[in-house]
Amino acid sequence: MTYTIAMANKSNYRIHFIQHIPFEGLGYIDNWINENDYELSVTRMYGNYRFPGLSEFDLLIIMGGPMGTYEEDKYPWLKEEKAFVKEAINANKAVVGICLGSQIIAKALGAKVYPNKEKEIGWLPVTFSDARSQALFTSKDKSPIVFQWHGDTFDLPVNAKLLASSEACKNQAFLYKDNVLALQFHLEVTEKSYAEMLDNGLDELTDGKYIQTENYIRSNTHYIPECNRMIKSVMDKLIENI
């Protein structure tokens, strides 16, 4: 048995993504979209944002950001975004969330989101929960090195399948109803996108068991190609299983 992710018709495939801050965009996923000539639209929460109608997209991608899902007083738009994501899930849309995006998905599915005991920043391993989870990413390694930058975690939503864990954070990735994928880690990073995250987050590189130094992070970008290969595999499976 393998995991599949059910999708809609591939022709004129429409992807919409939500961006929370200028320096956390689609990264390698943008390359993947361009290579396949899919339609792309965006909602930028740091501007005059507008959410599309549910009939206007086939796949929703929710990117990361430094805010917590529980910081509605500081970021009032979070309440509206969480409601929109919940509507998309209830409408059986395909949804992918990365970092903050995964936490918004978890919250939309009724799970608690809260600060993790330890922050994870840098090139760190995650371990797939079983062979089927590993196969979803077509990973060569059961415990690949991925790019992490998060301080929050979440409880596993009811009926969600745990895909990956790490030493610092049990719930790293999950799949819900075969069409909703949540990833705490950043497989989409490119040489440019990781550097932008790092340049804008140097103040977060404090002492911590799972927080690496700036020099170490910049010196280990050789992990990027495998991260990109894994996110390409996941996104291809979204399309293959139409």
Image: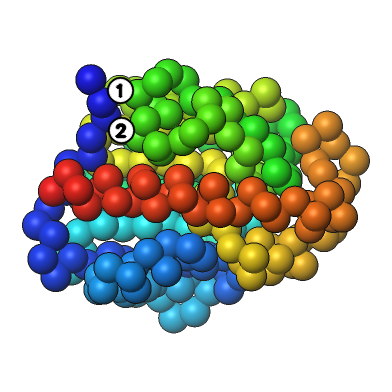
Q: How many marks?
A: 2
For disc 1, the marked residue is: 159
Please state the horizontal and vertical placement of residue 24, each as a whole percent of the image.
Answer: 57, 65
Please tell me in which quadrant of the rendered image residue 184 appears.
top right
Residue at position x 75%, y 51% from top? Answer: 220
Please state the horizontal and vertical placement of residue 126, each as a whole percent of the image.
Answer: 59, 31
Amino acid type of the residue tagged 2 in the rendering: Tyr
Residue 142 visible within the image: yes
Of the image marks 1 and 2, the number of the one nearer the N terminus: 1
Residue at position x 26%, y 26% from top? Answer: 2
Q: Residues within 10 Å of mark 2 (few under 14, many from 20)?
A: many
Q: Residues within 10 Å of mark 1 (few under 14, many from 20)?
A: few
Please state the horizontal and vertical placement of residue 19, each as a whole percent of the image.
Answer: 48, 66
Q: Secondary structure at mark 2?
A: strand
Q: CA distance from mark 1 to mark 2?
A: 7 Å
Residue 112 visible within the image: no
Taking depth in this image into account, of 144 and 186 the one nearest to the observer is 144
Residue at position x 44%, y 81% from top? Answer: 48
Amino acid type of the residue tagged 1 in the rendering: Asn
Please tell me in which quadrant of the rendered image residue 145 appears.
top right
> Which residue is outermost to the right?
207
> Which residue is outermost to the bottom?
48
Residues at circles 1 and 2 in contact by the CB criterion of under 8 Å: yes
Q: Which mark is residue 117?
A: none
Q: Secondary structure at mark 1?
A: loop
Image quadrant occupied by the N terminus: top left
Residue at position x 74%, y 61% from top? Answer: 198
Looking at the image, residue 206 sits to the left or right of residue 124; the answer is right
Q: How are the colours assigned in the image? A: rainbow
Looking at the image, residue 113 sits to the left or right of residue 134; the answer is right
Looking at the image, residue 97 sits to the left or right of residue 148; the answer is left
Q: Which mark is residue 176?
A: 2
